[in-house]
DNA sequence: ACCTGAACACCGTTCAAGT
DNA sequence: ACCTGAACACCGTTCAAGT
């Protein structure tokens, strides 16, 4: 949302460079040629300034990447999972899908994301929302926090392995195409030495599919629920009525 | 095991450089100063050759890192989880702990690990073992493969977030120390804007602990089991008797 | 406050040459 | 087969200077 899409090389007289322009340039280069292509010099050239002008806005390259990671995290759609009327499992699913969509759109940025601490305001806001959601699901505070970590580990872990599997820099091919490529590769597994792997080739090729992403997420949620409540696992749990709050945890409402 | 620990700068006349010496040097530099310190020139200097001599053994820097990732994966202790007499959950746990120990010992190498495809022979062997283990647990082939992916996503995702949280290059501080550092940081969370996060500070500080690592793993396994069998979740399932094989999946034994 | 020119100390990689 | 010297085309970052 904060990135006005049409990130093109500027033309006309320069008035005032902004941090966002620098981040736009960095993201474009990252999308096109991966981390190697997103050099300070390359970014500067893209926005039409000398390399060292970047240091007016950021203390260094690492700070540019960190700010970019934060901005990408800020683009996650909170509305999709903030609606407390919806069943909480649906809300978690919506969050998981949204984060994946947004990050796989920028494969080159995924490494920056997970390589940094993700302790900025957007990361905190996301964490807060998820804790609230899990409180709605009647998890006790400790389990909720642990479940939140488990969720983020799963989401980011999946995405990291997914983009690493694509191998090439630049934008990701469509999901079906990547699955097909993987199938060709896994079909070559020698069945005499790796019988189980060879037999599982089709499933393994499908690891990067949305379907398997959700399958894993559901196993995770099953495990969390089973442990923490005792509610039947496949039941739709609509969560708490809107505005209501579980036993003293979280903010009190007047 | 293949790295003879005492990776010191060579002295005396050079006879024959080996790939392993190069990988040792790369790992040492990675451990000391992170990815930036592990330059081709730095590696070459450490083994006592000119920078371009490295290209006799590897086609490029990326290939060095890829080979190093493979070697580290090969150091995972298979005995710990290959024993089919032990309950399968114990075996999975042993694998998860071993991988974590081995990778957190080299924080600088974790990024290389998950940034590459992990499609080498050691990765395949590990995957094969895990599929076998899950077959022992009576999962059907498709669920077993999916569960295997879920497991690796969790293990590598946890480790990536754990080392990223440490922030600094070089070796990781002891677990307790890192938890303490995180607690200080999370205690500063403004309770008015992020009430759930502020209340969960102690649990969040503990995210990098072995205990929470295992908690997440157990939720995962619960979710997998609940879905795939119907065996009571907290029961110890010793798996199949040694040498026996579930209904036609995997290698037939004479 | 914001930007530049020039420089410094590095990179990864290639190539022709040496043994 | 294995290694080197020298070079090429880059890096990130600093500093003094300009507006």
Image: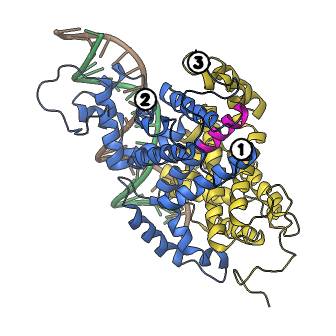
Chain colours: A yellow, B blue, C brown, D green
Is the residue marked by circle 2 packed among few (<14), some (14-19), or many (20+) residues within 10 Å?
Answer: many
Mark in the foreground, 2 or 1: 2
Q: Magenta part of the protein: which range?
A: B140-151
Q: Quick one: which residue is furthest to the front in this view?
A: B241
The stretch drawn in magenta includes residue B148: yes
Give the SS element for disc 1: loop
- Position of the N terminus of chain A by quadrant: bottom right
Please give the name of the residue rendered at 55% of the width and 70% of the height, measured from the top-left corner: B203
Measure the C-alpha gap from mark 1 to mark 3.
Answer: 46 Å
Quadrant of the image occupied by residue A87:
bottom right
Q: Nearer the viewer, residue A47 or B58?
A: B58
Q: How many marks?
A: 3
**From the viewer's perspective, is residue B23 above or below residue B205?**
above
Residue bearing the label numbered 2? B67
- Is B240 within the magenta? no
Labels 2 and 1 in the same subunit: no
Which part of the image, by quadrant, shows the C terminus of chain A? bottom right
Expressed as whole percent of the image width and height from the top left, the position of residue B143 reads 71, 37
Task: Please tell me whether mark 3 sits on a helix, a strand or a loop.
Answer: loop
Q: Percent position (x, y) of residue A111?
A: 56, 46
Foreground mark, 3 or 2, reads 3
> Could you tell me if residue A17 is visible in this image?
no
The chain ID associated with circle 2 is B
For label 1, the residue is A105
> Left or right: where does residue B60 sit relative to residue B158?
left
Mark 2 falls on what kind of element? helix
Which of the two residues, A5 or A66, is positioned nearer the viewer here? A66
Q: At 75% from the left edge and 37% from the top edge, which residue is drawn?
A: A209
Q: Which residue is mark 3?
A: B253
């Amino acid at each position: 949302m904060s990135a006005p899409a049409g990130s093109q090389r500027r033309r006309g007289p320069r008035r005032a460079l902004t941090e966002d322009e620098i981040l736009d340039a960095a993201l474009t280069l990252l999308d096109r040629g991966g981390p190697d292509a997103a050099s300070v010099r390359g970014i500067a050239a893209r926005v039409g300034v000398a390399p060292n002008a970047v240091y007016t806005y950021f203390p260094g390259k690492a700070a540019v990447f960190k700010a970019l990671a934060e901005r990408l995290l800020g683009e996650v759609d909170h509305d999709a999972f903030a609606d407390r009327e919806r069943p909480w499992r649906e809300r978690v699913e919506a969050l998981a899908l949204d984060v994946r969509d947004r990050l796989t759109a920028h494969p080159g940025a995924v490494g920056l994301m997970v390589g940094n601490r993700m302790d900025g305001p957007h990361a905190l806001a996301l964490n807060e929302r998820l804790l609230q959601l899990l409180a709605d699901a009647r998890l006790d505070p400790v389990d909720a926090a642990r479940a939140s970590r488990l969720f983020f580990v799963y989401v980011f872990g999946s995405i990291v392995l997914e983009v690493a599997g694509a191998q090439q820099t630049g934008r990701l091919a469509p999901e079906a195409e990547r699955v097909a490529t993987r199938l060709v590769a896994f079909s070559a597994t020698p069945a005499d030495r790796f019988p189980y792997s060879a037999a599982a080739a089709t499933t393994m090729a499908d690891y990067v599919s949305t379907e398997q992403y959700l399958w894993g997420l559901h196993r995770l949620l099953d495990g969390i629920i089973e442990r923490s409540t005792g509610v039947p696992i496949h039941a739709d749990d609509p969560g708490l009525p809107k505005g209501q709050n579980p036993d003293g945890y979280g903010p009190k409402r007047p």
